Image (cartoon, coloured by chain):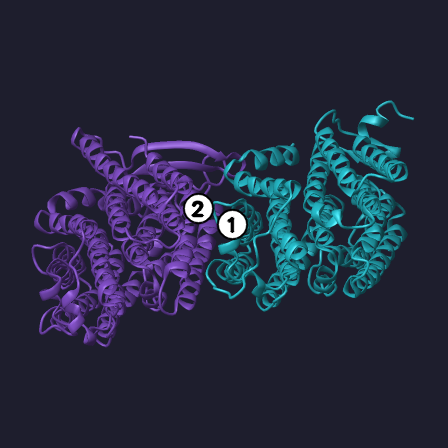
Amino acid sequence: MNLSLLVILPFLTSLVVLLCRGFKQVRAVAATGAALQVGLGLALLCFYWNQRVSGNTGLMLFQEDHVWYAPLQIHYHTGVDGISVAMILLTSLIVLAGVLVSWNIEKLSKEFFFLLLLLSVGAYGFFISLDLFTLFFFLELAVIPKFMLIVIWGSGNKEYSAMKLVLMLMAGSALVFVGLTGIYFHSATADGMHSFDLLRIAQMNIPVETQKLFFPFIFIGFGIFAALFPFHTWVPDGHSSAPTAASMFLAGISMKLGGYGCLRVATFLLPAAAHYYSGIIVLLSAIAILYGAFATMMQTDLKYINAYSSISHCGFVLLGIGMLTKTAITGAVMQMVSHGLMTALFFACIGMIYDRTHTRTVAKLGGLLKVMPFISTAFVLAGLCSLGLPGLSGFVAEVTVFMGSWEHADGFYRWATIAACSSIVVTAVYILRAVGQAIMGPVGQDHFRSLKDAGWNERLAVTILVIGIVAVGVAPFWLNNLIAPASEAILHTSEAIMHR
Amino acid sequence: MPKDFFVLMKAELLVTLLLIIILLLKIGNKKQGNGFLLQIINLLLLVNLVAGFFCNRPGSLFGGSFHTDHLLVLEKNMLSLGTLIISLQAYDWLLQHKHVAEFYMLLLSTLLGMFFMISSGNLLLFFVGLELSTIPLAALVNFDLDKRLSSEAAIKFILSSAFSSGLLLFGISMLYGTTGTLDFAVLAEQLNGSPLQLFAFVLLLAAFAFKISVVPFHLWTADVYQGAPVAVTSYLSVVSKAAILFVLVPVLYIVFRSQGNTWYNIIYLLSILTMVIGNLFALRQQNMKRFLAFSSIAQMGFILIGISGQSEAGGTSVVYFVLIYIFSNLGAFGVVALMSTQAGKENVNDYRGLYKTNPLLTWVLAISLFSLAGIPPTAGFFGKFFLLLAGADKGNYGLITVAVLNMVVSLYYYLRIVKVMFMEQNGQPVERIQTGMPAKMALVICIGGVLITGLASGAYQYIYSLIAG
């Protein structure tokens, strides 16, 4: 399968959107494009599965390699493993759901969908890149559309939030850049040239001291995207000011860029340093998990609740990566998928509630189940997924992370795992409290009674995300079988190099 | 006269010919308005640019004091391109102006000076070219004849230029005193790093730093940029700086090659100073021209990093970045020029809500600013990436870290403008700006360049092949 289609399709859709006349044409084109993306994602899954079943054990499948800047050995090199396939599928689902919940945006609709689709170009390109330059190119490509989306269509203190978000993320990518140049100049191929190629660098033995020097740059850089403590402060502001679809993107995809980058670049290319720093990573993620959970308890705004809980949940991703065991890394990737779907559903529901009631404050809501049963049920489902109810994706992912973490026999890691586990109790507290106050109970204000439940587009968006969550929760094996070989390959390659 | 005189000096002769034609047009044409004259001149500039791509041969004349090769031809073409774009952008402004022919005669004189300067193989010819390119510029800065600020800017410009020329001459005389030669090639062999030669080098570098406004020699920049007519400001910030950079690189790489370690440290410190101070001052500017002045100072800091790489990739990245810089900075200046001449607005706050009335212009300015900030997929991303990559070759990761953090800071002020244009509501946004065909063409060229030069790797590879040979 030609992976470049994943980049070309959303890009072409965004161009067609610009040529459209009228708001109905624009959204029809955007929705068609997004639906085609899901089709591509599913097709990719099938083709990938087919290759694996028929015995193709290559590290990366569907590779495509073109020279881009010959004098600097920059290539356009793409390929996917199980982790990338899972991320691509996640992205396509969230894009479709995001387009559907933005169905009624009439203010500058052309620009809105253009930027949304441009964002997805960046995400897909990032997930398929096997060349560090291309990877960095797509990473930065996905930053500015976020700024525009928040600044133009956002709410609240949007100018501040947008600027904070974009500056912090760009600082992250600036650190990544330093790390990349460091890797580039310490990579020497057989012909004495430097290389940006992920697979080639992974086979090289970069000196341990160099790894230790550049690992923090790359890990913190990507960590800022993934809300690594203490660089998580853009998350609450950015998420709460963004329009619904942009929040879904930010939490569902953008934060995953960080987790994926930590895994694919930092851990994969600099294995010795990953072992060296793993204690610090685990410590910081455990703090993020607990801090995020406790901070969520104090929030009164639904969007802030979800934003802070995202910090906590993304902590599990980094915890799993820091543990460096096969199960933990698999769990981390599953958590990325699960959190992406769950948080997108959450933000979609919050957006729908806000559109109708014009408030996001928990205390002013109440009894929504009586007036809008569909949205409320979806909200409760997202909440239950967040607190890890068996049968939904959150449970599967978190249990996998914990099991993988427990494989680490060292005392410190066990204590960190225990601390992280205890956050689940806190999660239950804030989720159940929010559900209890906003959804259950007597109807908060009289005018709520006249509000309508979800429209067809919103129902469709919710259904897509719920199917994803349940599919992972009820039958986790397909996702596990997709990811586990890839995470084993990452660890295996790096250990083989270290023992050389 | 050598046989291939006409081929080797083709670019210079063409510009001289243009000068004469314009002079004759001025004398012969009393009745027709400015529009006719401007169209002819723009056509001639286009012919000049196109002719630059044909019949090129490397070689040297006058005992080595004038030389040309494919790289120099490319650089001259880049300068011609910049001049053409600026001329198109200035169309609307010049339509109202009384002295069109004079404007172009001065402009082309500076271009001629730059051509001689970058082709020079000898310090003396270099100095002559530099002066020829500077003195008419001072007159151009004063071209808004009825504005006080414009005259003030011209005085500031001529004084600082004269001072830097003095430094340059002092440096040249000391180099001559210690080595007994003015020829670049001979000079490169004779340099032994004696204190007097290092002093001469510092003076030389200071003169260069003045011209490309590197901190701490940047103090004239903002005032002159603000006072000068926009067309001249863009010429100053793009074409004139580009020409100096095209000389600076070979002077450092070839003439002072033996002193590489010494000048590396100087360039490295200057680049940090330039980036940091340029950025800090750009943060709070309210006037668009002053803002672009400080932003262009900061850009010079990044270019110095590329120069500090001391490699083929370094030289390539500088020339490549200059090409991108021509497109992106002229794109930004094009919109600023329209706002300034058509609506009379120069402040950042006047751009509030511009998207409502002028969506296309807003996109042009936004994309140009993204390119200046180094955001993909614009060419600026590639340009900055390659500059920093070339600089990182030296293993000085502290410098690279400072540079990328400066890029983040610069993003703040570029995005501030974008934000103002897209979101902020205003009681009276600027009315829809009517643009003539030439200005539109100029903006299309700029945006096309910004979008294509990076994604298509051809330009970089071509420049690299010229430099690496």
Categorize mark 2 by other alpha carbons within 10 Å: few (<14), some (14-19), many (20+): many
Residue A25 is situated, as x and y percent measured from the top left of the image, at: 33, 42
- Residue A234 located left or right of residue B369: left
Residue B69 is situated, as x and y percent measured from the top left of the image, at: 74, 32
Residue B377: mark: none
- Residue A188 located left or right of residue B271: left
Q: The disc numbered 2 marks a residue on which chain?
A: A
Q: Is residue A170 above or below residue A21?
A: below
Examine the rendering and report whether any part of residue A329 can be seen.
Answer: yes
Q: Are marks 1 and 2 on the same chain?
A: no
Mark-to-mark CA distance, 1 and 2: 21 Å
Three-letter code for the amino acid on which mark 2 is drawn: Phe
Residue B413 is situated, as x and y percent measured from the top left of the image, at: 54, 62
- Residue B390 located left or right of residue B128: left
Mark 2 secondary-structure assignment: helix
Q: Quadrant of residue B217?
A: bottom right
**Quarter in which the N terminus of chain B is drawn:** top right
> Total of numbered circles in the picture?
2
Q: The disc numbered 1 marks a residue on which chain?
A: B
Q: What residue is shown at x 90% (from left), y 47% (from top)?
A: B180
In front here: A49 or B20? B20
Three-letter code for the amino acid on which mark 1 is drawn: Trp
Q: Residue furthest front?
A: B31
Residue holding disc 1:
B363
Q: Is residue A392 above or below residue B4?
A: below
Q: Quadrant of residue A368?
A: bottom left
Q: Colour of chain B?
A: cyan
In front here: B359 or A232? B359
Mark 1 secondary-structure assignment: helix
Q: Colour of chain A?
A: purple
Residue holding disc 2:
A137
